[in-house]
Amino acid sequence: MDEKREKNLYDDDCDQDQLETDDIEDSSSHADALDLYLKEIGNIPLLNAEQENELACRIREGDMDARRTMIVSNLRLVVNIAKRFLGRGVELTDLIAEGNLGLINAVDKFDPCRGNKFSTYASWWIRQAISRSIADQGRTVRLPVHVTDLVNKWLRVSRILTQKLGRRPTVSEIANEMGVSEEKVKQIAKLAQKPASLESRVNDPDEVELLDLLADINAVSPIDQIDQELQCEEIEKLLEENLKEREKEIISLRFGLKDDIPRTLEQIGEMYGLTRERVRQIEEEAIKKLRKAVKKE
């Protein structure tokens, strides 16, 4: 691929959202532009695992040419995933644009030392970028004003309590501050929840993301706001089939998979009468089991 074509597909001097096809005024030229884009990226050679790892190592050393090559070489992956989300009220070009942003995040975060395949790692970031966009658009249309106000209040109270307490507040603490029941808080949390629970961070000095820990999960079904229960079912199935009951509960609490409120090691330890270190050991063992399970898929 010549330098000019590569620059047209991705230019590091431009904003990330310039990866999308040019804005087209009428549907005919819009389709033509999309066809041209698909033909262009269809001519770009795919990378094998060895090439991906080599590029990833160079990227971690700050090689922007390697970064550009990794992104451009995986644009077809974005299109393949984006097509699965058609029929949900968003144009394919917009889905591709959002997916490209997810791809960029994956390229920047990918660690070849973990032994995971880049395409499966990137697939999660691409799916989540697309599904989050669909969710944001859908939520704007579907939620009544009074519900949106409740969600905003929940977010504000959660943020204030987090700053005040130095940790994520419990459901009970949020309910007290808002003057509503705990059940109401849980309902509001579900409405506000983005379809990215695997990205939930744990409020510890050594913050981690479950997505980065598992890295290699192959989702069977597309994940979006309309069907976001699918995501919960996939995660639940993964935990159910591979973890002991206590391991499953600790992972769910640690990453807020049930109520979108991640717990610290200390909080979980208090619940189970365990030390912080013991909870950490159980979590570590559970993560190893999950990694092993997803690599088999």
Image: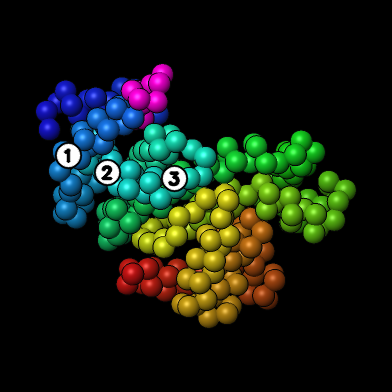
Task: Give the numbered dot on residue 44.
Answer: 1
- Element type at mark 1: loop
Mark 3 or mark 1, which is nearer the start of the sequence? 1
Task: Give the numbered dot on residue 76.
Answer: 2
Badge 2: how crowded within 10 Å, few (<14), some, or many (20+)?
some
Residue occupied by mark 3 = 86
Q: Are marks 3 and 2 in contact (CB under 8 Å)?
A: no
Whether residue 67 is visible to the viewer of this picture, yes or no, is no
Q: Quadrant of residue 256?
A: bottom right
What's the image's color scheme? rainbow
Q: Position of residue 140 (x, y in %)?
A: 64, 36
**Magenta region, residue range:** 18-30
Q: CA distance from mark 2 to mark 1?
A: 9 Å
Q: Residue at x 67, y 75 (%)?
A: 272
Magenta stretch: includes residue 245: no
Mark 2 or mark 3, which is nearer the start of the sequence? 2
Q: Residue at x 68, y 76 (%)?
A: 273
Mark 1 or mark 2, which is nearer the start of the sequence? 1
Residue type, label 1: Ile
Badge 3: how crowded within 10 Å, few (<14), some, or many (20+)?
few
Horizontal side of 134 relative to 261 (left or right) equals: left
Magenta stretch: includes residue 19: yes
Q: Are marks 2 and 1 in contact (CB under 8 Å)?
A: yes
- Element type at mark 2: helix
